Amino acid sequence: MSLIVVGSMAFDAIETPFGKSDKIVGGAATYIAWSASNFTKPIKQISVVGGDFPQEELDALTKRGVDMEGVQIKKDEKSFFWSGKYHLDMNTRDTLETQLNVLGTFEPVVPESFQGAEFLMLGNLAPAVQLSVIAQLKQRPKLIVLDTMNFWMEIALLELQEVISKVDVLMVNDSEARQLSGEYSLVKAAKKILSTGPKYLIIKKGEHGALLFHKNQVFYAPALPLEDVFDPTGAGDTFAGGFIGHIARTKDISFENMKTAIIVGSAMASYCVEKFGAARLREITKDDIDARVEEFVQLVNFDIALTN
Ligand code: AMP
């Protein structure tokens, strides 16, 4: 089993209607690794941080089974920094600031020991970096999943479209699907996006769950109704980590198994939002995950008698 994860490792400053964090550790690849490492090990991480990134955070991931050989540490530079503010409904947020810092000049190098990986999770970061990782792999992975963000649609659309054309699964949120396709209807947006390369499209809708599109099929998974959502940051990446972690564990890339992977991803995301940053992900056990997956099963389990 082998999974390569690419993405930002970062400092975040988050404001929600219920609280404000100082600079805390975040980043797409951080959340993906904490989430996916529940299902498959080792995770082969590719990212970049500055000299300001806490060594104990890197050590905690190593201890967790994340191989950090592909993580560059630029001693004299600063880590990527992002700050965001959530609206009252917590489903929408504004980016207040993005400081690329080390990410602006990042040239990933895929270690020799990462070659031959069966699964590739391209988490959110510059499309040029995502393309470079794909180009460096001598053998194409069985499944390539891509997550991205409006930021890259605005400043690197052509490169982003090129990566999209090379992947199997694209994950975006609803507003990003609309921005990318120019269509308001998510069904039309999905058709357009699927015509540009990916075989599967996952549209994340925050507290309204996620949709999986493939050819003419659609699957919908709700999000678990939670009493308290403390901080949604990283929920999308945590979802991605659960999704690819489940696929890598089962080695099954069928549409049917992707449905299960979406439930696993949703269960992981439901834990992520319960505390600031990745704090909750660091505490949960396999039993917690199973319990939440079971809650999902109960949430959508019903009998129905057709009228004729
Ligand atoms: P999510 O809430 O799952 O969409 O992801 C939030 C994480 O994405 C934060 O921890 C940020 O550090 C990271 N992030 C925000 N903007 C970017 C960007 N432009 N490129 C890469 N990572 C980003």
Image: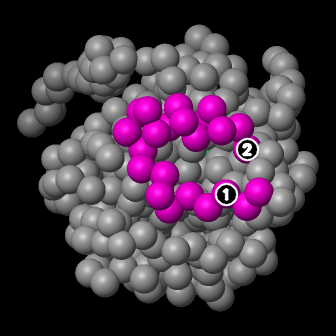
Near-viewer residue (241 or 104): 104
Q: Residue at x 44, y 85 (%)?
A: 135
Near-viewer residue (119 or 114): 114
Q: Where are the magenta residues, as a range?
A: 53-75
Q: Are marks 1 and 2 in contact (CB under 8 Å)?
A: yes
Q: For the residue marked with disc 2, what is the amino acid?
A: Phe
Q: Position of residue 225 (x, y in %)?
A: 51, 20
Q: Residue at x 42, y 44 (%)?
A: 66
Near-viewer residue (141 or 202): 141
Near-viewer residue (45 or 99): 45
Going by the image, does 143 lie left or right of 104? Answer: left
Circle 1 residue:
73
**In the rendered view, would you say 51 is above or below 270?**
below
Confirm whether the magenta stretch covers residue 163: no
Few, some or many residues within 10 Å of mark 2 (<14, 14–19, 20+): many
Q: Position of residue 188 (x, y in %)?
A: 50, 70
Few, some or many residues within 10 Å of mark 1 (<14, 14–19, 20+): some
Circle 2 residue:
53
Q: Which element carries disc 1, helix, strand or loop? A: strand
**In the rendered view, would you say 179 is above or below 18?**
below
Residue 293 figure quarter: top left
**In the rendered view, would you say 101 is above or below 115?**
above
Q: For the residue marked with disc 1, what is the amino acid?
A: Ile
Confirm whether the magenta stretch covers residue 72: yes
Q: Position of residue 216 (x, y in %)?
A: 28, 68
